[in-house]
């Protein structure tokens, strides 16, 4: 879910496996809207999101890059995007700590 803040900033909230996470609104590889990301599990079972445009996978706990613009067999767009980023270092997704209060309200540390 995208959340617009009073200061004009937009963040994305994710709820998976009973935990709420918060990130910047755009991916770090190609500035794709994270609102369109899909949930997936990391190699250790940790909650992650995958960017549909380029296949980049971020761990939700830390924003760590699990896969950086991987090439996909038979997908010309992803192949092109992967070739453009092949010499670029992975950039983590900025994440913000969250806490759900006893009354159900959510606090985000910016």
Image (cartoon, rainbow, N blue to C red):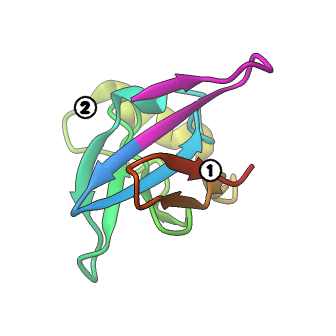
Check residue 12 for magenta coloring.
yes
Check residue 9 for magenta coloring.
yes
Q: In which quarter of the image is residue 6?
A: top right
Number of residues whose C-alpha sits closer than 10 Å to that of mark 2, classed few (under 14), some (14–19) or many (20 or more): few
Which residue is tagged 2? 75
- Secondary structure state at the residue bearing disc 2: loop
User: Residue 15 appears at what percent x and percent y?
Assistant: 31, 49
Question: Which of these two is toward me, 103 or 66?
Answer: 103
Give above or below for 58 relative to 56. below
Sequence-earlier tag: 2 or 1: 2
Is residue 5 something that shows in the picture? yes
Quadrant where the image shows the N terminus: top left
User: Residue 27 appears at what percent x and percent y?
Assistant: 56, 38
Q: Nearer the viewer, mark 2 or mark 1?
A: 1
Q: Residue at x 40, y 52 (%)?
A: 103
Which residue is tagged 1? 108
Determine which of the numbered discs, if any, sits on residue 28 in the image. none
Q: In which quarter of the image is residue 8?
A: top right
Give above or below for 21 relative to 14. below
User: Residue 100 appears at what percent x and percent y?
Assistant: 45, 58
| Image position of 76 (left or right of 101) | left
Give above or below for 39 relative to 81. below
Q: Which residue is drawn at 19% across and 35% down?
A: 74
| Image position of 60 (left or right of 7) | left
Residue range (magenta) = 1-13
Q: Which residue is drawn at 28% across and 83% down?
A: 44
| Image position of 3 (left or right of 60) | right
Q: Which residue is drawn at 23% across and 56% down?
A: 40
User: Residue 63 appears at what percent x and percent y?
Assistant: 55, 61
Q: Which residue lies furthest to the bottom in this view?
A: 44
Question: Which of these two is toward me, 19 or 34?
Answer: 19
């Amino acid at each position: 879910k995208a959340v617009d803040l009073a200061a004009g900033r937009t963040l994305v909230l994710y709820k998976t496996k009973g935990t709420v996470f918060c990130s910047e609104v755009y991916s770090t590889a190609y500035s794709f809207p994270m609102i369109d990301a899909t949930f997936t599990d990391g190699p250790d079972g940790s909650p992650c999101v995958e960017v549909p445009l380029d296949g980049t996978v971020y761990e939700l706990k830390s924003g760590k890059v699990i896969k950086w613009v991987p090439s996909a067999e038979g997908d010309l767009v992803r192949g092109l995007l992967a070739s453009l980023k092949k010499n670029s270092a992975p950039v983590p997704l900025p994440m913000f700590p969250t806490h759900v209060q006893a009354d159900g309200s959510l606090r985000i540390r910016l």
